[in-house]
Every structure is written in C-alpha cells, then in structure tokens.
Amino acid sequence: MGYGIQAYAVNEEQLDAVWASNDEGVIDRALATSLGAYRSRSDSRLRELLGAIVRGTAPVGNTVDAHDYLYAMEVLCALYGTRAEGEIRLSPKGIDRTPEMRLFLRSSPPFARWRSRDFPVVCAWGKAQVEERLASQQSWPAALDFEREIYLSWLRFAAERKLSLVGFYY
C-alpha cells in the first residue's frame, strides 16, 4: 500500500467560517468544484457529510471517523483554495526520518475542534506558520531531496498567496 500527502493553499478564515454557518449554498458550491463532482460520483454520502460540517453537527473529539470526513474536507479545500503541485510519497518510516513532516502531520487541522486519531490525517499550517516553516528550511535526509523540494514548493505556493497550507495524508 502506498502513502501520500497532498496539500492545498487555502483561505483558512473562509474555510473555518463554514463550520456551523448554516450556509447550505456552500454544499452546492463545493459539489460544483471538479473535485466535488468527482468525489460525489464515488461517495453518495458526500452531500450529507458536507451538510454536517455546515450545520456544525459533525462529530467532534476522538469519535470522528476520519475516512467519513476526509473527502468532505478536501472538497472544501478545493472550494476555498488551490491544490499545490506534487504529492509526497512517504511511508510511516519515511515520515519518522523526517522531523518536518512529523511536525506538519501533527499540526492542527482546519476546524481545530475536529480532531481524529484515525488514519488518514488532515493537518494545517496557518499563514504565520507557513512563513516560519519556509524560513527555517530544516534539513532532510539526502535520500528525500525530491520530497523536500515538493514540500518547500508547497510552502512557497501558500506564502506567495498569503494562505494557509492544509495537508491530507492517506
């Protein structure tokens, strides 16, 4: 089984405002994105899951089944942001060898009240954190130079747009 991390440069304020907004129009706008249309063909619950987020009724705490909400979160990121180029393919062992990726994957997800102990993982760096991480440019194992370059390109992509970076590890 392969593991991958994808990222979106996202307007975190707009994304966070969706939670319990009761703005049912968000659902239709999210489903109208190309990712929303694609995901809804394979997940008949997507409209229901987006609705739970919009109404603020999605489970919170450690009861969340991340698989149920991962695609809904990603579709919202597609609505309020842009997917960054590239995908980082790292196994859990590869992540263990990369402190920067461990930090990113342990960061707070959008809707900080939504936490999960399940795999897949949703994580985020806020705008200020994107700038800090870009400035720090921590070292990576030489064997992971390709992955490091993708990660740095994500940080630059978000920083140039003054947006947050949301990642999905699955």
Image: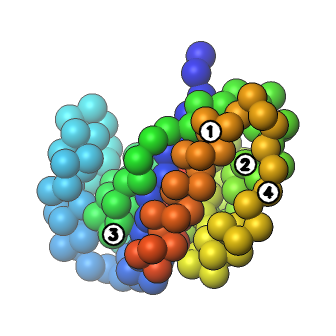
Please name the amino acid that badge 4 sits on.
Gln
User: Does 56 sit above or below residue 141?
Assistant: below
Mark 2–mark 4 distance (CA, rounded to whole Å)? 10 Å
Mark drawn on residue 147: 1
Which image quadrant is residue 60 in? bottom right
Q: Residue at x 45, y 63 (%)?
A: 157
- Foreground disc of the pair 2, 4: 4
- Residue at 78% across / 34% down in the picture? 142
Q: Which residue is mark 4?
A: 138
Dot 3 amino acid type: Tyr
Seen at 48% across and 68% down, the residue is 158
In the picture as drawn, the residue positioned furthest to the top comes out as: 1
Quarter of the N terminus within the rendering: top right
Mark sitting earlier along the chain (2/3): 3
Crowd class of label 4 (few under 14; some 14 to 19; many from 20; radius 10 Å): few
Q: Residue 101: give its label.
A: 2
The tag on residue 80 is 3
> Secondary structure under badge 3?
helix
Q: At label 1, which amino acid type do we have? A: Glu
Q: Nearer the viewer, residue 58 or 88?
A: 88
Q: Earlier in the sequence, mark 3 or mark 1?
A: 3
